[in-house]
Image: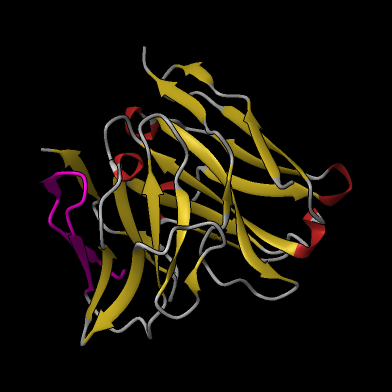
Amino acid sequence: EVQLVESGGGLVQPGGSLRLSCAASGFTFSNYCMHWVRQAPGKGLEWVANIKQDGGKKYYVDSVKGRFTISRDNAKNSLYLQMSSLRADDTAVYYCARDPDEYGNGWYYFDYWGQGALVSVSS
Amino acid sequence: DIQMTQFPSSVSASVGDRVTITCRASRGITNWLVWYQQRPGKAPKLLGSSTSGLQSGVPSRFAASESGTDFILTISSLQPEDFATYYCQQASSFPLTFGGGTEVALK
C-alpha cells in the first residue's frame, strides 16, 4: 500500500525557516517524480514544487522561488521541503504527492497524497 | 502561467441529482486535465481524466469528458459520499495549476 507521511509542520515567525519531511513507503520511491502541493486555510490547491527521480531537476511556483528548496534522499525514501524567509501567505497545509509516471519525466499530476502538514506563519 | 477557470464555484444538489462541473484553460493544454475530489479535512483524491479514464475504485457514476475547449466532470446520480469539493488541474506545463474548486453541497 502506498503511503506518504508528512512531518515537520508547526508555528513559525515571519522570516523564519522550517523543513518539512515526507516518508514514503509501499512503492519504489526512487522511480517516481515527487511534488509538494499546498492549501491555505479555506482556499484552493496550489502546486509548489516538483523534483525528478534523481533530484537533478526541480521546478517551483514563482511565489516560492529563492525561498523554498525541494530535495530527496532515495536511500531514506524521503522527500523534503526546506522553507525559508517564510511569510504569512505561506500559511497552509502542505501535501507531499506522487507523480504516477514511473521511470519517466513525469505526467505532472498526483495519484497519491499524504495527509498533510500544517505550517502556520505568524508572530 | 495557464489559468484554470472552473465553474460553478458551488452547487446545491440532492441525492440522485445529476451534477456537471466545467473547467476551461486559458490556453491549450492538449487534453492534460485531471480531476480530484476533496472531502473536508482530507487530502485530495485523484478521480481521473478524459484521456486516462477513471482511477481504479472510482464509481462509474463519475465521468470525465471534453467538449471543445471545455473539460467536464459529471456525476450522474449524486450519492451522500459525493458531497465534497472538486478540483480540476492542468498537467500540461509548469507551473501546474488548479481550478478554483467546486463545492457540491446538500440542498
- Please determine whether, in this image, residue B82 is positioned above or below residue A42: below
- Please determine whether, in this image, residue A7 is positioned above or below residue A53: above
Q: Which residues are magenta?
A: B1-25
- Please determine whether, in this image, residue B68 is positioned above or below residue A107: below
Residue A95, percent from left and from top: 52, 40
Quadrant into which the C terminus of chain B falls: top left
Between residues B34 and A107, which one lies in front from this camera angle? B34
Q: Main secondary structure of the magenta part?
A: strand
Residue B22 is inside the magenta segment: yes
Residue depicted at 48% across the width and 56% down the height: B46
Residue B44, percent from left and from top: 44, 45
B45 lies left or right of A105: left
Residue B83 quadrant: top left
Residue depicted at 50% across the width and 23% down the height: A16
- Its colouring scheme is secondary structure
Q: Looking at the image, how many numbered discs can be counted on the residues?
A: 0
Between residues A101 and B82, which one lies in front from this camera angle? B82
Between residues A56 and B57, which one lies in front from this camera angle? B57
Quadrant into which the N terminus of chain B falls: bottom left
Q: Residue furthest front?
A: B16
